[in-house]
């Protein structure tokens, strides 16, 4: 039986998951759910916008609120996962970008920036239990965490170029923080979607496991590996390592929204998004 060291105590892994979760009510919005493991202090943040966890403005706002509440509660770790059995997140909800309301489009991008800044820069250690496909924005969220565990037979990657769109610099920095530069460059220009096995091989994910329960246990073990590390020293080290990536966006936040809005509104981009949405719908029929 697997076990993990939590607060200096050796605990059987099934004990880590059974009967010890309580909801963090302030953080549970309509589209996210947060539960804290009372034994370990680890929060599980579940995206619950089914069927595909498309990141629309509302889900992004709920995610931000949840991440902030988890930080406020000084949880020992944050595990990001999905309520779906097959999709971690389908990435940005394309309907937010196709024929958009201009004011909402700005708010949408601003919300994505804020979620990224909060997750990438979180003082609480972060991990992703990737229990399904994770394209584009889904991959961005997972790659912003410090550790990733994935289930087999799914795909993950930044596929923007395949959609005729260009991933912003901070998407690319997030990828480069995880992958060797050459692999990141090749994957980004190709818009490559990695299978779970390929993702493990290149280091886009840290481990593969057979079930969501196992993924959560692995994430708990990752957090337990910090039991002898000073939490403030840990956070300040992470902060320094990620400082340049975050500063780049913080300094250019307004310009970044403008770039996004102007890019998305280009007729050729609108056309690509329209075709893509149509192809997704046809596939669903
Ligand atoms: C010159 C330099 C300038 C630089 C400036 C920078 C400016 C920035 C540019 C903009 C960057 C924008 C970045 C975008 C990142 C993204 O995240 S884009 C989204 C990418 N996502 C995808 O490509 C995923 C697409 N979906 C799928 O591949 C599949 O749906 C799935 C594998 C996730 C799930 O498959 P399955 O289980 O078979 O479900 P489906 O039947 O396909 O889907 C069910 C249902 O959901 C709808 N849907 C799926 N994904 C999305 C989505 N991302 N958005 C909206 N809707 C989605 C799908 O159409 C089905 O709907 P219906 O049931 O038919 O209504």
Image (spheres, grey):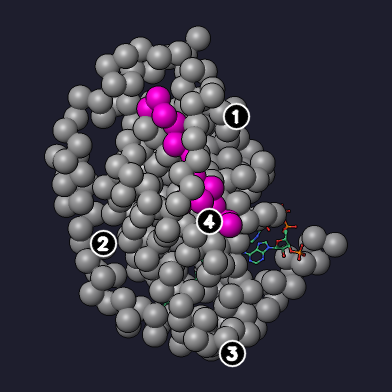
To which residue does mark 3 refer? 267
Spatial separation of the CA atoms under disc 2 and disc 4: 29 Å
Residue 242 in picture, x, y percent from top left: 24, 54
How far across and down, in percent of the image, does residue 37 sit? Answer: 44, 31
Task: Find the distance from the CA under tag 3 to the CA under tag 1.
Answer: 43 Å
Q: Is mark 3 on a helix, strand or loop?
A: helix
Nearest to the observer: residue 73 or residue 167: 73
Crowding near the residue tagged with mark 1, few <14, some 14–19, many ≥20 C-alpha atoms within 10 Å? some
Q: Can residue 113 be seen in this view?
A: yes
User: Who's the residue at 62% across and 45% down the image?
Assistant: 83
Distance (Cα) linking label 4 and label 1: 26 Å
- Residue at position x 60%, y 51% in the image: 48
Q: Name the residue under label 2.
A: 245
* First of labels 3, 1 by sequence position: 1
| Residue 50, above or below 73 | below
Pointers 3 and 2 in contact (C-beta within 8 Å): no
Judging by the rendered image, the residue that carries numbered circle 1 is 211
In the rendered structure, which disc, 2 or 1, sits on the residue that comes first in sequence?
1
- Marked residue nearer the N-terminal end (4 or 1): 4
In magenta, the rendered stretch is: 27-40
């Amino acid at each position: 039986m697997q076990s993990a060291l939590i607060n200096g105590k050796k605990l059987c892994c099934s004990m880590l998951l059974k009967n010890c979760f309580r909801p963090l009510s302030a953080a549970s919005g309509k589209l996210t759910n947060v539960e804290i493991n009372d034994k370990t202090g680890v929060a599980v943040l579940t995206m619950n916008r089914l069927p595909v966890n498309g990141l629309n403005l509302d889900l992004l706002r709920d995610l931000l609120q949840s991440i902030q509440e988890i930080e406020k509660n000084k949880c020992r770790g944050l595990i990001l996962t999905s309520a779906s059995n097959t999709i971690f997140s389908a990435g940005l909800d394309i309907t937010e970008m196709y024929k958009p309301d201009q004011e909402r489009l700005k708010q949408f991008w601003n919300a994505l920036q804020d979620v990224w800044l909060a997750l990438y820069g979180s003082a609480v250690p972060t991990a992703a239990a990737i229990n399904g496909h994770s394209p584009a924005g889904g991959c961005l969220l997972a790659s912003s965490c410090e550790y990733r565990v994935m289930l087999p037979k799914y795909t993950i990657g930044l596929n923007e170029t395949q959609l005729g769109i260009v991933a912003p610099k901070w998407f690319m920095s997030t990828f480069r923080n995880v992958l060797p530069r050459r692999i990141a460059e090749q994957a980004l220009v190709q818009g490559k979607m990695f299978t779970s096995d390929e993702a493990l091989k290149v280091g886009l994910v840290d481990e593969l496991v057979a079930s969501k329960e196992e993924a959560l246990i692995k994430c708990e073990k990752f957090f337990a590996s910090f039991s002898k590390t000073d939490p403030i020293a840990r956070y300040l080290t992470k902060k320094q390592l990620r400082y340049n990536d975050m500063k780049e966006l913080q300094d250019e936040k307004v310009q970044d929204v403008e770039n996004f809005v102007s890019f998305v509104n280009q007729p050729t981009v609108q056309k690509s998004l329209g075709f893509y949405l149509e192809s997704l719908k046809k596939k669903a029929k």
